[in-house]
């Protein structure tokens, strides 16, 4: 998701990783268009051999290349693996072709984050036949056969977003709310939406808030999200009091529409992934909140799972994946690592900076320098 949590650079991460994480966290940064192999040498973490990793795309979120790729590379290298990390650039056929190559080459473990769960499930069937363990990374392949899943508590992400919006609208009974959700094919987006509904539906039912429209956006396309919101906004004659935006890119497109109508900063808007643009929008007062996901923890847990699976040690893997995600397509519980997301409002931005995900110099520019000083961001 894509949208659908983007999120701790420690001393063990190389200088190259820090540069990649801090300097490339903007849409299009660090993306070559033609995804290159990203191999890391074994580093004595107890495992060995090659691990194949396929990330989904770069168009709708900066996180995959800026954070996930370098952090997975560092974490897998620390476990002793040689990691080949590729990006399918939103192309399902390319995703499948990359997977076929990894399976044919006999990787020890395959780690995938498919845009389309049906593509992931088909790949997992092939890997299973080849005796290669698969880890679903960040997104589950519903109906698939992966043994393990590593992500965040994505329903909790939705709950935090919705509660933040509800809190911002407490002084406005009956406020009109629009929900701009992520891709309907992304299970994470579904979970975000479930979290939104858990908090907001009771408020709609009690008339404390009023749902104007809830709309999923194919492919997490921010341009489509902005157009969709503008159409809703026009239909209700601008009577929108708050917006649930599933991630920062969608939030930015919505804020553009609000700005055109002189309502930016007056209509609360949520977000997710703690991107520099999202953090700047919060500093300006145009965005109410975002969600911080410690992707380094996600990468490290994935690497530890891979090391256990490469050795055939399912007991060790089970000790890491103590949570579960129910897969309704094949009615099974997928062993999972579900990490906790964090709410970020203006007072919390310094946390994201201090932990190395964004440089202060990336967000404290121009008119925002004083705001950064005021909020302890340096």
Image (cartoon, rainbow, N blue to C red):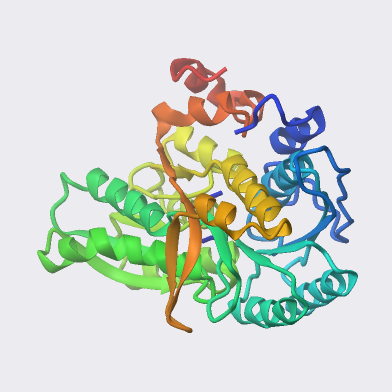
Q: Quadrant of residue 20?
A: top right
Quadrant for the N terminus, please: bottom right
The quadrant in which residue 216 appears is bottom left
Looking at the image, residue 132 lies above or below residue 313: below
Q: How many marks?
A: 0
| Residue sitting at x 63%, y 80% | 121
Which sits in the foreground, 229 or 278? 278
For image coordinates 77% across by 48% down, the residue present is 47
Is residue 227 or residue 280 the one in the foreground?
Answer: 280
Image location (x, y in percent) of residue 173 = 13, 53
Q: Residue 257: percent from the left, percent from the top?
A: 47, 57
Measured from the top left, where is residue 350 in percent x and y?
A: 50, 25
Q: Which quadrant does the C terminus fall into?
A: top right
Front one among 207 and 155: 155
Left or right: 357 as drawn, with respect to 85:
left
Q: Is residue 62 visible?
A: no
Query: Camera-side residue: 96 or 265?
Result: 96
Residue at the image point whose x is 60% and y is 38% from the top: 276
User: In the image, is 326 to the left or to the right of 266?
Assistant: right
Q: Is residue 105 visible to the viewer in this orientation of the structure?
A: yes
Q: Position of residue 148 (x, y in %)?
A: 57, 63
Please give the name of the residue rendered at 64% of the width and 31% of the height, measured from the top-left corner. Answer: 9
Does residue 58 sit above or below 350 in this rendering? below
Above/below status of 369 relative to 165: above
């Amino acid at each position: 998701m894509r949208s659908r949590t983007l999120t701790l650079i420690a001393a063990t991460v190389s200088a190259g990783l820090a540069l990649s994480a801090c300097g490339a966290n903007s849409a299009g940064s660090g993306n070559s268009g033609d995804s290159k192999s990203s191999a890391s040498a074994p580093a004595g973490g107890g495992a060995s051999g090659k691990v194949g990793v396929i990330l989904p795309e770069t168009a709708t979120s900066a996180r995959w290349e800026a954070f996930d790729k370098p952090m997975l590379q560092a974490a897998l290298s620390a476990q002793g693996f040689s990691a080949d990390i590729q990006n399918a650039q939103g192309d399902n056929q390319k995703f499948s072709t990359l997977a076929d190559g990894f399976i044919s080459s006999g990787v020890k473990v395959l780690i995938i984050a498919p845009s389309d769960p049906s593509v992931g499930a088909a790949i997992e069937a092939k890997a299973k036949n080849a005796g290669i363990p698969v880890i679903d990374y960040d997104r589950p392949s519903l109906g698939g056969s992966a043994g393990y899943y590593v992500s965040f508590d994505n329903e909790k992400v939705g709950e935090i977003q919705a509660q933040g919006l509800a809190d911002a609208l407490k002084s406005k009974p009956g406020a009109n709310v629009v929900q701009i959700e992520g891709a309907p094919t992304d299970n994470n987006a579904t979970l975000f939406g479930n979290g939104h509904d858990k908090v907001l539906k009771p408020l709609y039912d009690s008339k404390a808030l009023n749902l104007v429209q809830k709309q999923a956006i194919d492919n997490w396309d921010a341009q489509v999200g902005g157009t969709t919101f503008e159409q809703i906004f026009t239909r209700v004659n601008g009577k929108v009091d708050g917006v649930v935006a599933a991630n920062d890119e969608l939030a930015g497109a919505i804020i553009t529409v609000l700005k055109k109508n002189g309502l930016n900063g007056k209509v609360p808007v949520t977000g997710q992934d703690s991107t520099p643009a999202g953090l700047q929008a919060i500093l300006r007062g145009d965005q109410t909140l975002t969600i911080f996901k410690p992707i380094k923890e996600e990468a490290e847990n994935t690497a530890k799972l891979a090391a256990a699976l490469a050795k055939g040690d399912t007991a060790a893997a089970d000790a890491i994946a103590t949570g579960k995600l129910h897969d309704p397509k094949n009615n099974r519980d997928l062993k999972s690592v579900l990490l906790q997301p964090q709410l970020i409002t203006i007072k919390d931005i310094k946390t994201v900076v201090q932990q190395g995900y964004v440089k202060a110099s990336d967000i404290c520019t121009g008119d925002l320098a004083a705001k950064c000083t005021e909020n302890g961001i340096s």
